[in-house]
Every structure is written in C-alpha cells, then in structure tokens.
Image: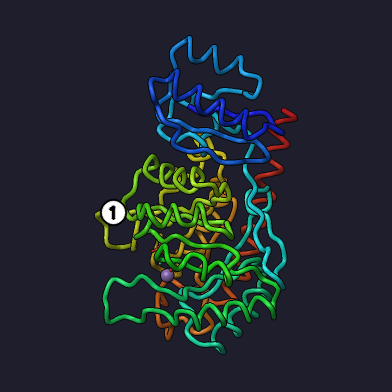
Amino acid sequence: MIIVTRSQVTDTEHQQVVELLQQLAGGQRPISAITMQGRRVITIDGNSLDAQTHAALSQHRAVERIVSTNMPYQLVSRAFQSEDSRVVVGDLPGSRSVTIGGAAPVIIAGPCAVESREQLLEIARAVKDAGAQVLRGGAFKPRTSPYQFQGLGIEGLQFLAEAREETGLPVITEVMEPDMVEVVSQYADILQIGSRNMQNFPLLQAVGNSAARRPVMLKRGLAATIDEWLLAAEYIVAAGNPNVILCERGIRSFDSHTRNLLDLTCVPLLHELTHLPVIVDPSHATGRRELVPTMSRAAIAAGAHGLILETHTDPDRALCDGRQSITPAQLQITVRETRLVAQIMSDSAVLSFVA
Ligand code: PEP
Ligand code: MN
C-alpha cells in the first residue's frame, strides 16, 4: 500500500499522515517514507486497509492518492507509476548525459575488467568510435575462484575516471560491498550490482540511501525469479533511490552449450509489471561471442532499452571473460544493426497505430 502526499506538504502534515496510519492500521508501521518527484511517498507492508482507515487517510488534506498494487513489490510497479521511468546518467564532471529508458536503445560497452590504464583507454576510444554511449569496466571483480584476477580496485576506478574525461562517456562499474558505495560513487556514473549480489540486502540499502544516489544497474541473480528481482529493486527505491535499471544477464540452466539461458521473455513481461528501464547483457547470458550479435538484435526486438556488451581489443588475451567479448569492429556492426531494429520497431508501432 502506497500513500502519496501532495507536493508542498509540510513536515507536520507528513507526520500527521504517518501517525494516522500507525493509529488506524493497528500499529502498522510505515516501512518506508521517501521523497519522489517532490512528493512524500509512504509505503507500508500489505495491500489492504480497512474501509475506515482508507476513508480517514483519503480525507486528510495532505494525501493526494492511495495506491494498492496487489503485488509484493510496490514502488517499482506499473500500478504505482504507469509511465516509463527514464534514468538520466552521467552527472560527474566531464561526462555526457545519457538517458536510459527512452525509445533509442543505449549501448554500454567495454571490457569485463579494467586491466591497465593503456588497455582501458584504448578500448574506451574504440567503443566510443563504434557508437557506444556508456563505458563499462570492472574494477572490483567478483570471481568464482580466489586465484582468478580480482580487479585493480581503486586504481581501476581512477583509470575509468580518466577514460570518462578523455571520451566524455559516462562509466559503469560494479560495487560489491556497502562500505565501498560512497567511494565508488566518486568515480562511477552508474553503480552495477552484480548477479551474485542481487540479494545482498545491506548493499541494496546502501546504494539506495547513499549521499550520492548514483543510478544503479541491478543485474538479475543467477537463479532469481522475476518477483525476487523486482523486490531487490524495491529495496533500492524504498531506501530513497528511484534511479534503477534492470539488467537481464541470463539464468542458470541445465544445458552447458551456453553459459546461461537468456530469458528474453522477461523483457516484455517486465514492461507489464514495472516502469523501470530494462537492458540486456547477451555477453554473460550466452558466454560465446559469436552468439552476441544475434541475441543483441533479438533483445532490442523484444523491447530492451539497451544492451551491455563486453568488448575487448584483444579478447583472446583478456584477463576476464574473453570468450564472450566482442571486438570493437563487431561492436560497430552490432550498434548499427540494433539501431535498425529499433527503427523498424518504432515504425511498426506507428503502422499498427495507423491500422
Ligand atoms: C560482469 O558484468 O562482468 C559480471 C560479473 O556480471 P554478472 O554479475 O552478471 O555475472
Ligand atoms: Mn564479465
């Protein structure tokens, strides 16, 4: 249940609504009270209020609307917000601003891991020339084995900031622990929460209520259901950060031909369930670079707002995920193809409207 107050509501009025809710809803405590688009939004657990409570709240002059979602997640649901959210990224100095969630697909590209200053700058220039709008690169890498390359840490973040200054591309990088959120936010335009951390609740809360409130790309957990994923997104929004982008990156399956199983059905399904932007990562989903261009086109045809593509100038010698990394030349072709698919999609939407 969500109670949205009018804009310009005073602290006293807001407190009155909270108290009324506590009193009338049998001591039910508000679980979240945040400000969204200039309005205070109070969310409580559960989806029904008795008629008396509902009437008392809706008559309060500070209350604009009461929303019942009938879903486990609330603030991220379509029932709460019918129009698509657009997440504007790139507010650090030197960065161009890019909107994720509009009609034009946004392409994020770069290496799995930042390996060195030269490697990152070379790839950053190449992905920019190929048409990517955001640069990716992991500085802190969650690796399955403790003997694998773990990332350059803070030094990697510094190289990302330098690449942004030179190219103007906003940068995205993973944050793995709550205590690192503020530090990573000093360098990154978008914080990535990796699959292995999708249900790391202290981390979700930390990116939600951090002072910087950087946009967050939340990757789907290795075997997460759609509801678990949306509830993880709800944690971030309920903590005070509405700028969340969902990223489908494949889920575990029984077949070893691909690294994961790319669940493209989730894209149109998510558009029905949530207003958050959805992007697709065909690199981790397939694990094989030869499948990436086809699944990129398919993802855009399914309605994805963008793609995140691991790209490397020497993929066979990459320190991490080379097998699934495409080259800048392949990226350039994929960017063109996905733009064409997006163009056809918008034309066909116009045609079906006219028909
Ligand atoms: C990555 O983006 O390099 C990564 C580790 O992704 P995931 O969390 O989806 O495995
Ligand atoms: Mn990777």
Q: Amino acid at mark 1?
A: Ser
Mark 1 — residue?
A: 253
Q: Quadrant of residue 62?
A: top right
Q: Residue at x 55, y 27 (%)?
A: 3
**Neighbour tally class for label 1: few under 14, some 14-19, many 20 plus, Cα within 10 Å:** some
Q: Quadrant of ligand 1?
A: bottom left
Q: Quadrant of residue 34?
A: top right
Residue 261 showing in the rendered view: no
Of residues 166 and 256, which is closer to you in this image? 166
**Mark 1: C-beta under 8 Å from nearest atom of ligand 1:** no
Q: Which element is circle 1 on? A: loop
Q: Residue furthest front?
A: 12
269 to 4, vertically: above or below: below
Of residues 183 and 28, which is closer to you in this image? 28
Compared across the picture, whether 60 is left or right of 139 comes to: right
Of residues 127 and 330, which is closer to you in this image? 127
